[in-house]
Amino acid sequence: MAINLKTPEQIEGMRKAGKLASEVLEMIGPHVVKGVTTDELNQICHDYIVQQQGGYPAPLYYGGNPYPAPLDEMGKILEPVRADGFPKSVCTSVNDVVCHGIPNKKPLKNGDIVNIDVTVIKDGFHGDTSKMFVVGEATPQAKKLIKITQESLYLAIDMVKPGARLGDIGHAIQKYVEKHGYSVVREYCGHGIGEVFHEEPQVTHYGRPGTGVELQEGMTFTIEPMVNSGKRNVKLNRKDGWTVTTKDRSLSAQWEHTLLCTADGVEVLTKRQEESF
Ligand code: MF3
Ligand code: CO
Ligand code: CO
């Protein structure tokens, strides 16, 4: 199957959506403090995306029907949504939750590490990005896991240019992570993105050098390594159908950006102000 290359007009749409997603992460940072619930963080992000950005939070009812769910201009859901789509507007993955954590009523406590994964749909285009937040003071071990995971994303981003192969990028992430004694989750990966949330290619965070899709100018995709401090194995919560945790209950971290492969390298469509590439 062919990977769809974006036109200049589509790229402009991706830039706008990416910028909005990054701004949600910048906005929510100061709210991630001891005692707040992930439900409250979800509501703040939801209202910001719908009311301030004129966007739609892509996780909301993802996998459900109808999708996207009809909202009024205040962001209230206008009709009940059938089927079992994701029930909230962002994913919040705390401590041993690897990804797709569902916001809930449990207050965050000192030392928790939290990934907030935001995807904004704006004018039909998706911007998908996540970062780790620390509640109060984390342990040195947790801080190191977060740092190595972020560095693995950054070294992968540095490799993006036409002709680079996804197997090489995955291998580089895996090698860096494993060198530090951590493991890479295999069951979930990055993905092509555009007018569709998850499209080809699959972007694995492990791989064999010299294999896989060759990047081309105009491809837009995410890289979003999930790194465990213990073993790589994960388990899916069969009751809620979404929450993925480490099987050994070890801590897990994740960072994500949406990227454009340009003529001579990469444009980070979800870059935050604190970052430079
Ligand atoms: N944002 C996630 C990703 O990076 C996908 C979340 S889908 C949801 O691909 F339904 F769980 F929200
Ligand atoms: Co993604
Ligand atoms: Co995401």
Image (spheres, rainbow, N blue to C red):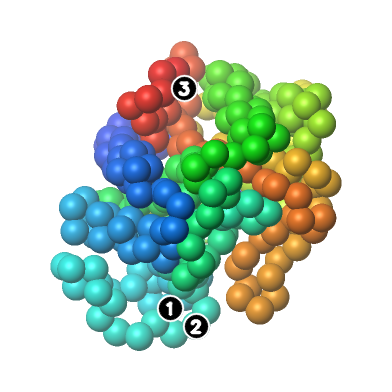
Q: Tag 1 or tag 2, which sits nearer the N-term?
A: 1
Name the element at disc 3: strand
Residue marked by disc 1: 65
Q: Nearer the viewer, residue 36 or 146?
A: 36
Q: Residues within 10 Å of mark 2 (few under 14, many from 20)?
A: few
- Above or below, 267 against 23 in this view is above
Name the element at disc 1: loop
Residue 208 image position (x, y, % from top left): 80, 30
- Above or below, 142 against 242 in this view is above
- Tell me whether the residue at label 2 lies in contact with that at label 1, contact meaning CB atoms closer than 8 angstroms: yes
Q: Nearer the viewer, residue 172 or 166?
A: 172
Residue 128 image position (x, y, % from top left): 44, 45
* Measured Cα–Cα span from mark 2 to mark 3: 38 Å
Q: Residue at x 64, y 56 (%)?
A: 97
Residue marked by disc 3: 266
Residue type indicated by callout 2: Ala
Decide if residue 32 is in sight here: yes
Residue 49 occupies quadrant? bottom left
Residue marked by disc 2: 83
Residue type indicated by callout 3: Val
Q: Residues within 10 Å of mark 1 (few under 14, many from 20)?
A: some
Labelled disc at residue 107: none
Q: Tag 3 or tag 1, which sits nearer the N-term?
A: 1
Residue type indicated by callout 1: Asn
Quadrant, the C terminus: top left
- Above or below, 242 against 2 in this view is below
Q: Residue at x 46, y 52 (%)?
A: 34
Q: Nearer the viewer, residue 94 or 84?
A: 94
